[in-house]
Image: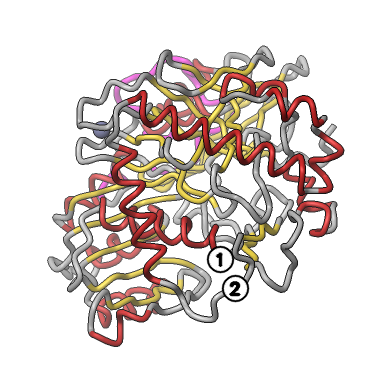
Amino acid sequence: MNSALAPVMRLVPVLRNLVRTHRLERASPERLDAERRRLLVTLVRHAQADVPRYRELIAPETAAAFRGPEDLPSLPTLDRTEFHDRAPEELLAAGFTTANTKAGTTSGSSGIPITIRNSEHDLGYLRASYLYDMLASGLRPWDRMAYFRVTPFLRHPLERFGLLRTFHIDTSTTLDDQVEAFLAARPTFLVGFPHVIASVVEELERRGVRYGAARRVLFGGERLTPTARARVLGHLGARCHEVYASVEVFTIARTCRRGALHLRAADVVVELEQDDGSVVPADGTRAAEGEILVTRLHSEAMPLIRYRLGDRVAVGPADCGCGRHTPVVLRVQGRSQDRFRGVDGREFYADFLTYAVQDFAEVSRMQLVQERPGQVTVRVVLAAGSELAGAGVAGAGVAGAGVAEAGTTVTERIAAAVREAVPGFDVRVEAVRSIAPEANGKIRIVKVERAATG
Ligand SMILES: [Zn+2]
């Protein structure tokens, strides 16, 4: 085990890992399964033997009897709070310290910022998965890449040779500044949260600027309404790819050329905890939906086994037909703790309501906020031109609720559709100019802002 942290990025391990992943993702299900088993058994035994916290959680005989993904339910799940509340020494494997590992810190959109530490070996996989994301999305050496994000990033060594030039579009600055930075960079490859890229494109359209240099767009981190997505891709004339990733577990899923979001089965093992509490493996044999539990197969410094990421995910069968035999993610829904409450106290995941809203072609952005049980405020940003269809506020007391009639405004029709989905709810729809992102730059489309959470 190499426990030294390289001062500069090592390219060779990255490329080696890239080739390995590429082969495994296209391998036969049998070969991929054998490799996952080998890595998983090694990881579980390593965690039990070398990590203080796992020594408390996993009995030696449980680790000794562990044979593969089917035995994962014999292990405890790992909560985010573990990383927040515990000293790193309890979670780091023997031989690793805060000095010879590199920290990755989540922005804490769930309210709990956490730090994961990676060894140089782990980072080889992290960088390979990022590079693979880019290459699979059509990146070419001469591309000029624009990263739409809040935090700056380290430059890579290839830029010195004029390859893969990168530009930072700081999404915490004003929209005017972002547009300036974008036009100055003249990027051909765009990477970032969908809503920030959409905002820049919409501003270009408003100014009458037609930007034709972009070839590819790589979206990640949140869901964009079909209307906004079509507008971005229509304006840019670019092809779109998508990743589902997080700081803790790297890239979990990535779109293939057919647009299906494949699980990266060579590097992660995914299970879904369903609403009845039962856990099923997302192995492509059946469709399932629930809270995602992720095991990162390459996490030697701080093993991540059955990590509760906090997202609600639906995974379908492995039947894409593109050459990959890995399961396909059908939907990534928001943080699973954002559950709405009815007046009767019943709680439910509110993500299905967002589909009732985004079905309206006029809706460019949306956010559903619950301030008290039995109530929801729907904020919508309407696409340019649809203001004529009737912006405004549709609140409680609007006549004809439940029936969409010709002549009613779009906000009234949205309110009616939402009321139909959650009968008895106090539904208010507000047309707003913009929706404020969280500190990490993402928009939470389902949000609970109850004064006192019970
Ligand atoms: Zn595919």
Helix, strand or loop at disc 2?
loop
Which stretch did the figure color magenta? 385-412
Residue 451 in the figure: left or right of residue 253: right
Q: Quadrant of residue 423?
A: top right
**Residue 100, x across and y down, in percent:** 67, 71
Tell me whether circle 2 and circle 1 mark residues in contact (CB < 8 Å): yes
Amino acid at the residue labelled 2: Leu
Near mark 1 (Cα within 10 A), the count class, few <14, some 14-19 or many ≥20, is many
Point out the image quarter for the C terminus.
top right
Q: Write the residue at 20% across / 31% down.
A: 322
Q: Quadrant of residue 235?
A: bottom left
**Residue 114, x across and y down, in percent:** 71, 56
Front-most of 142 and 50? 50
Front-most of 423 and 199? 199
Q: Looking at the image, is 392 positioned above or below residue 435? A: above
Q: Looking at the image, is 379 positioned above or below residue 185? A: above
**Residue 30, x across and y down, in percent:** 36, 23
Report which residue position mark 1 lands on.
120
Helix, strand or loop at disc 1?
helix
Residue 92 in the figure: left or right of residue 379: right
Residue 316 in the figure: left or right of residue 73: left
Report which residue position mark 2 lands on.
5
Q: Write the residue at 34% across / 62% down.
A: 15
Count all numbered tags in the image, as a single digit.
2
